[in-house]
Image: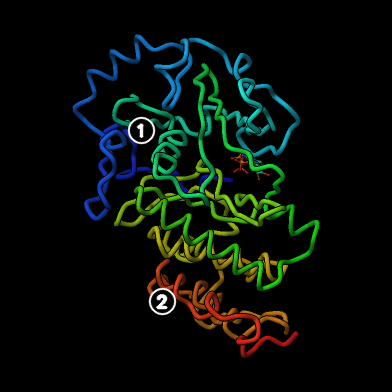
């Protein structure tokens, strides 16, 4: 994960950020509210060191992470924190415990009724509130600490992130890649409907259940509120960033997301990146594929990786693409 070109300008989150008007209205308890300023500062003064999402009234205050969740082995380490396997003591539920340094995201965002939450927590609160999407990882609880915050996340068991899965099993066949893409599109459409931009779609941020092959989108640490206008700073993984960011230092949410979906899909099917660097991608750049890949699949990836953002499909276009709706036998170009 990295943040590039930290030119916040209009995107500054100072607690007055407004949702763009084109978004579907959120449930009232999720809506940002400038009128809660005074209540929030009072609540902040009164708040205990521990905050929860929905169980704060039913649980004694100031119980620690240790009281409630048992920590297990390390699952992954990122630029700003670590993720451990864990278990909820009350019922043995498998969880993941993610520690995030406050240096990563000093921004806070108002969530009505819950005060100003760290950005990652606020975005996850938006996307995981009911009705939830089964393809987005659930935030179960969180703790605020002086130098870091701790997220308690759902942990499908057994599961692996898609990057490790591909390293162990080789690249995916088209049947499984389709299953991944269908779920990823559902997850991204759900985020969009909640006014959230994930901004770091890549195989490492997709968990796959090794039993059911169900997918969960994780890590909203690079995310932001969705807006119609261009973003002028980047957070995420440069290898998945769209060419317009490198060319003009600006990008719009959906075309950038769709670009990262294209890179992800190429990566899990071909076991490499599509281009040496998005910096050099133009409309004349050639994309090569393994001979075994079907024509429909190549067409979908090429569309996602169009050099011009306006030429890329929307999530709805992707959802109805023929590749996702034809069986293996119907795939004209499959050369296996
Ligand atoms: N809920 C979970 N269940 C199982 N494994 C998880 C879970 N959350 C994270 N992981 C593992 O930990 C890795 C890192 O998680 P995550 O991306 O949330 O951390 P991060 O610190 O934000 O990483 P980065 O800085 O690279 O973005 C994931 O790729 C995955 O392998």
Across and down, in percent, residue 211 comes to 71, 53
Q: Is residue 107 left or right of residue 216?
A: left
Residue for point 62% across, 25% down:
91
Depicted 230 relative to depicted 288: above or below: above
Depicted 258 relative to depicted 19: above or below: below
Which residue, as the protein is rendered here, is positioned at the far left? 35
Q: Quadrant of ligand 1?
A: top right
Residue for point 29% across, 20% down:
40
Residue for point 21% across, 30% down:
34
Residue in front for this viewpoint, 128 or 206: 128
Q: Which residue is mark 2?
A: 311
Residue in front for this viewpoint, 269 or 18: 269
Which secondary structure lies at badge 1?
A: strand
Question: Which quadrant holds the C terminus?
Answer: bottom right
Which secondary structure lies at badge 2?
A: helix
Of the numbered discs in the image, which one, if any, rests on residue 109? 1
Mark found first going from the N terminus, 2 or 1: 1
Across and down, in percent, residue 332 comes to 62, 90
> Looking at the image, what colour scheme do you see?
rainbow
């Amino acid at each position: 994960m990295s943040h590039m070109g930290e030119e916040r300008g209009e995107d500054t989150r100072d607690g007055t950020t407004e949702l763009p008007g084109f978004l579907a209205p959120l449930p009232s308890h999720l809506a940002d509210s400038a009128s809660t300023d005074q209540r929030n500062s009072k609540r902040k003064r009164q708040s205990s060191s521990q905050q929860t999402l929905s169980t704060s009234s039913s649980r004694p205050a100031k119980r620690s992470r240790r009281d409630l969740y048992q920590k297990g082995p390390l699952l992954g380490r990122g630029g700003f924190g670590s993720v451990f396997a864990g278990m909820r003591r009350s019922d043995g539920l498998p969880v993941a415990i993610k520690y995030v340094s406050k240096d990563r995201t000093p921004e806070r965002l108002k969530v009505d009724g819950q005060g100003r939450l760290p950005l990652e927590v606020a975005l996850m609160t938006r996307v995981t509130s009911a009705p939830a999407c089964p393809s987005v990882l659930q935030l179960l609880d969180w703790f605020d600490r002086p130098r870091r915050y701790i997220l308690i996340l759902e942990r499908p068991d057994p599961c692996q992130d898609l990057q490790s899965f591909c390293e162990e099993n080789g690249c995916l066949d088209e049947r499984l890649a389709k299953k991944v893409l269908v779920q990823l599109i559902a997850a991204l459409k759900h985020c969009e409907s909640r006014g959230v931009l994930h901004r770091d779609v890549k195989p490492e941020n997709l968990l796959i259940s090794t039993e059911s092959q169900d997918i969960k989108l994780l890590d909203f640490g690079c995310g932001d509120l969705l807006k119609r206008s261009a973003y002028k700073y980047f957070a995420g993984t440069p290898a998945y960033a769209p060419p317009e960011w490198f060319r003009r230092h600006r990008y719009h949410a959906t075309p950038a997301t769709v670009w990262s979906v294209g890179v992800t899909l190429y990566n899990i099917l071909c076991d490499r990146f599509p281009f040496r660097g998005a910096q050099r991608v133009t409309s004349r750049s050639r994309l090569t594929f393994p001979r075994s890949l079907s024509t429909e699949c190549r067409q979908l990836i090429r569309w996602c990786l169009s050099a011009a953002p306006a030429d890329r499909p929307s999530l709805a276009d992707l959802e109805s693409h023929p590749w996702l709706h034809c069986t293996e036998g119907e795939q004209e170009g499959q050369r296996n």
